[in-house]
Image: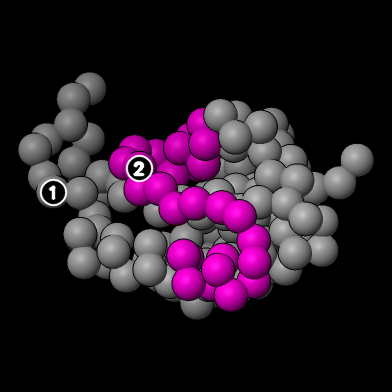
Amino acid sequence: MGIRSIVVGVDGSEPSYRAFAMAVGLAVREQGCVHACFVAHLPGAAAVGGFFAPVPLVGDAESDERLAGFVSEELGQAHVSGDFTCRSGEVAAELEQLATSCKADLIVIGRSAHPALHLGGVPRQLLARGRFPILVVP
């Protein structure tokens, strides 16, 4: 049984572009599809007393369109089926929800670019939950 459905987190960072490239390469090899996802999240300070303060989401329409264009172009060049979605919320949970709805065989995520975080918060959360196989790309 191969890897037919891959969810990959993209946010415009270099590690996320490398993760996307890895996901596309796997999809080409396995004749699968790629579901790329950008998750806008509320900053930690916005959560106050059990409710969310009305602050704008991190990310903007221009960035979303740029990422969507990049994903579409790369998938087309590789002749890989797939899509791009934007969500908001807690990043690891949103990626898991997408993986569940797509019946994903794998979640691919880039490692944090911040050296003090080593593996990164999102990959660490996904690994700790253990619901899907995870590929963390440096």
Q: Position of residue 15 (x, y in %)?
A: 55, 72
Screen quadrant of the C terminus: bottom right
Crowding at mark 1 (Cα within 10 Å: few <14, some 14-19, many 20+): few
In the picture, the disc for residue 115 is: none
Q: Is residue 42 left or right of residue 136?
A: left
Q: Nearer the viewer, residue 76 or 10?
A: 76
Q: Is residue 61 left or right of residue 122?
A: left
Q: Is residue 57 above or below residue 101?
A: below
Element under label 1? loop
Q: Magenta residues?
A: 71-98
Q: Residue at x 32, y 70 (%)?
A: 66
Residue 97 belongs to the span the image colors magenta? yes
Question: Label 1 vs label 2: CA separation?
Answer: 14 Å
User: Where, by quadrant of the figure, is residue 64 drawn?
Assistant: bottom left
Q: Quadrant of the N terminus?
A: top right
Location of residue 89 in the rendering, given as x and y in whole percent from the top left corner: 34, 38
Q: Amino acid at mark 2?
A: Arg
Q: Residues within 10 Å of mark 2 (few under 14, many from 20)?
A: some
Can you identify the residue that label 1 sits on? 56
Residue lying farthest to the top in this orientation = 50
Location of residue 94 by image quarter: top left
Sequence-first disc among 1 and 2: 1
Closer to the camera in the image, 37 or 113: 37
- Residue to which mark 2 is pinned: 87
Q: Quadrant of residue 54?
A: top left
* 95 falls in the magenta region: yes
